[in-house]
Image (spheres, rainbow, N blue to C red):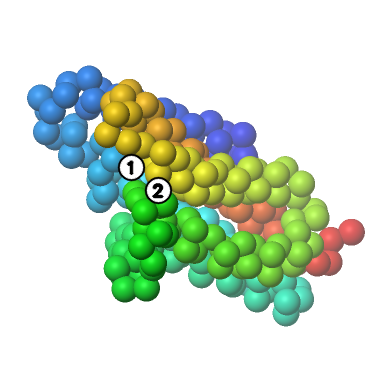
């Protein structure tokens, strides 16, 4: 499948999920089936599993790319990326980071920190580790993307969209008070979840496109002209 067709398919799936979420909100609990299956605020439902599957497919593409890597450093970078994406696939369903950050908050965080970040703090706790990982592997990943500029742009755009929602919009939760209108609460939540879904989908398409280019051309990353 062409990259443009794959992006269109991802966009269609996400539009359907967003439409079902809005329908569940409009019905205001009159259909518990829609509420349970499509509400973006819930976990363990269809949007969560779609996100998990896309992360897994992105991890598989990174693993395939690692196997085609010419240099040891490039291969290791792709293996680490595949592992990180596989972890995020599991995290979508099991919620590792929420549970782990909750343990840290209860046992190690000072009161002033919890007061400042009263609704969510995991982006602050895990942000430095995520940044360190990106800085560590990015130079090697960039070398392997040199022959597929469109795939690289697609993957990078997806990564930025995902973290823009997962970290940036997530942190806006701390600005919400009891006086915040429900419309803005729902809008923030929908923006966060849709940015994450779109980001994961675009990332998956970019990495899969790159893996397919390597497989079809039998050219290993790092040896492209």
Q: What residue do we see at 58% from left, 49% from top?
A: 159
- Label of residue 161 in the image: none
Residues marked 2 and 1 touching at CB (< 8 Å): yes
- Label of residue 51 in the image: 2
Residue 145: tell me if it is visible. Answer: yes
Name the quadrant of the N terminus: top right
Q: What residue do we see at 69% from left, 64% from top?
A: 135
- Dot 1 alpha-carbon crowd within 10 angstroms: few under 14, some 14 to 19, many 20 or more: many
- Dot 2 alpha-carbon crowd within 10 angstroms: few under 14, some 14 to 19, many 20 or more: many
Say if 173 sits above or below 124 in the image: above
Question: In x, y percent, where is residue 74?
Answer: 72, 71
User: Could you say which quadrant of the image residue 153 lies in?
Assistant: top right
Most foreground residue, 97 or 80 = 97
Question: In x, y percent, where is residue 75?
Answer: 68, 74
Question: In x, y percent, where is residue 36?
Answer: 18, 39
Q: Would residue 12 be found to the left or right of residue 44 on screen?
A: right
Most foreground residue, 19 or 188 = 188
Instruction: Return the residue found at the far top.
Output: 26
Residue 162: tell me if it is visible. Answer: no
Say if 180 sits above or below 89 in the image: above
Q: What residue do we see at 18% from left, 34% from top?
A: 35
Question: In x, y percent, where is residue 110?
Answer: 39, 67
**Regarding mark 2 in the picture, which secondary structure is present there?**
helix
Instruction: Return the residue found at the far bottom.
Output: 72
**Regarding mark 1 in the picture, which secondary structure is present there?**
helix
Q: Would residue 210 be found to the left or right of residue 86 on screen?
A: right
Q: Would residue 174 be found to the left or right of residue 204 on screen?
A: left
Residue placed under numbered mark 1 in the picture: 47
């Amino acid at each position: 499948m062409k990259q443009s067709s794959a992006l269109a398919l991802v966009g269609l799936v996400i539009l359907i999920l967003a439409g079902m979420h809005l329908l569940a909100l409009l019905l205001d609990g009159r259909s518990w089936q829609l509420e349970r299956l499509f509400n973006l605020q819930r976990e363990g439902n269809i949007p969560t599993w779609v996100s998990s599957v896309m992360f897994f497919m992105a991890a598989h593409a990174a693993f395939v790319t690692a196997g085609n890597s010419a240099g040891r450093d490039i291969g290791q970078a792709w293996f680490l990326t595949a592992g990180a994406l596989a972890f995020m696939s599991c995290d979508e369903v099991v919620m590792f980071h929420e549970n782990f950050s909750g343990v840290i908050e209860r046992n190690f965080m000072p009161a002033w920190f919890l007061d400042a970040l009263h609704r969510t703090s995991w982006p602050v706790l895990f942000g430095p580790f995520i940044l360190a990982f990106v800085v560590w592997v990015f130079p090697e990943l960039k070398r392997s993307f040199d022959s597929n500029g469109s795939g690289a742009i697609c993957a990078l755009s997806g990564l930025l969209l995902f973290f823009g929602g997962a970290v940036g919009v997530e942190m806006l939760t701390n600005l919400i008070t009891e006086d915040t209108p429900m419309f803005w609460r729902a809008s923030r939540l929908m923006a966060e979840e849709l940015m994450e879904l779109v980001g994961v989908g675009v990332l998956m398409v970019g990495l899969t496109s790159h893996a397919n280019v390597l497989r079809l051309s039998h050219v290993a990353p790092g040896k492209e002209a």
